[in-house]
Image (spheres, rainbow, N blue to C red):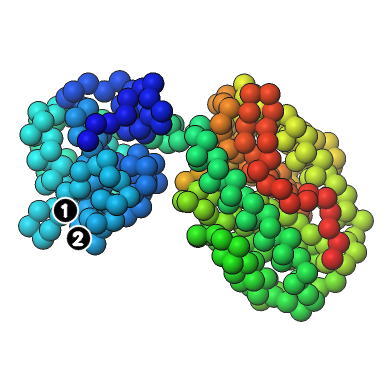
Amino acid sequence: MRMRRKGEVGMAATDRLLDLLHLGPKTAVVVHDPSNMFYLTEGYSGEGLVYISAERRVIVTDFRYTEQAERQAPGFEVMMTDKDRKATQIVAELVHTAGITEVRAETNYLSVDRYEALRAAVGEEVSFVPLNQAPQKLRQVKTPAEVVAIRKACDITSEAFSAILPKIREGMTEKELQVELDFTMFRLGAEELAFSTIVASGENGSLPHAIPGDRTIRTGDMITMDFGAKVGHYCADMTRTVAFGKPSDEMKKIYETVLRAQSMCEDALAAGKVCSDIDKLARDYIDARGYAGRFGHGLGHSVGIDIHEEPRLSTGCSDVLKAGVVITVEPGIYIPGLGGVRIENTCLVKENGCVPLTTADKHLIIL
């Protein structure tokens, strides 16, 4: 099957990868990371590996996934493994048949044992070079179709938040609220959960990645909910903190501080901005309000096929944002023994600003 080339509508992801790497006819790429496999095949979600060269596009998998691969990635050959013909042997056959002299492999993803098994099968005469997360680099800027999927996931997530609020009651456990929230996302159309839902009430709010447990919701609690739907294999991510009954003056101040930090950073988000500069904007404001050291994680991360992608809004990321990046803005303040607040939107970076894909109200809601 003829592959789409540059300049044609919907240039294939595999062609974009070959162009990015400037690969010649004697170099091949072998991909094992399921997210990269899905991206490069534009739809295959099973197991195995993907082999890409200038001449061939191949999915190597076992009997369980061959028909699925043919349906999901009609532009790819499908080669089946069996007990006498392992995936590494098929890669070796492909390499040797084409006279390939260099293989780019995901050394960041493969275990040492799997990498060594691949090298041994292909042979020492072929050079192995790290792929250096090239597919992830391509994945940073989302296509219009990817944005549509993420927007749909964000719509479901925002709608689930609105639907869950009337169901929160005194005596309800964090775990019960988590289950109700997860069910609501599925009922509204989520295909999967983007990640394990976080629900943290009262003093547990000081734990950024709290695991929902048996603590019951009480009057005066702040409740942090961090959750996201997944649609078409693309993730949403949002966090809201609500008050169950009148919050203390200190928690109201914390909420107002986080809301202001979140809003000012969202307003500053745009193509051409340096990631660490956006993070610093929130961090300096939170520190100045008397909460230095209580915002201990990065301001945000990109979202796509995986819930955490690059680039990130953090002190250590000097990347320049590009239009088409989808990234979260999620400052927080966490006070051990008291609780915490986090507010998070998923945003689409544009040339002159951003569009929040999360539509739920950010202002303090008192139940």
The numbered disc on residue 146 is none
Q: Nearer the viewer, residue 137 or 105?
A: 137
Q: Is residue 303 visible?
A: no
Q: Amino acid at mark 2?
A: Phe
> What is the crowding at mark 2: few (fewer than 14 residues within 10 Å), some, or many (at least 20)?
few
Query: Residue at the spot x=62%, y=36% of the render?
Result: 348
Q: CA distance from mark 2 to mark 1?
A: 6 Å
Q: Residue under circle 2? A: 63
Q: Are marks 2 and 1 in contact (CB under 8 Å)?
A: yes
Q: Position of residue 113 (x, y in %)?
A: 23, 50
Q: Is residue 316 left or right of residue 201?
A: left
Could you tell me which quadrant the C terminus lies in? bottom right
Q: Nearer the viewer, residue 337 or 331?
A: 331
> What is the crowding at mark 1: few (fewer than 14 residues within 10 Å), some, or many (at least 20)?
some
Q: Nearer the viewer, residue 42 or 312?
A: 42
Q: Position of residue 68 (x, y in %)?
A: 29, 56
Q: Is residue 220 above or below residue 132?
A: below
The numbered disc on residue 80 is 1
Asked where in the image residue 229 lies, by quadrant, the reply is bottom right
Query: Residue at the spot x=85%, y=47% of the render?
Result: 256
Could you tell me which quadrant the N terminus lies in? top left
Q: Is residue 125 left or right of residue 102?
A: left
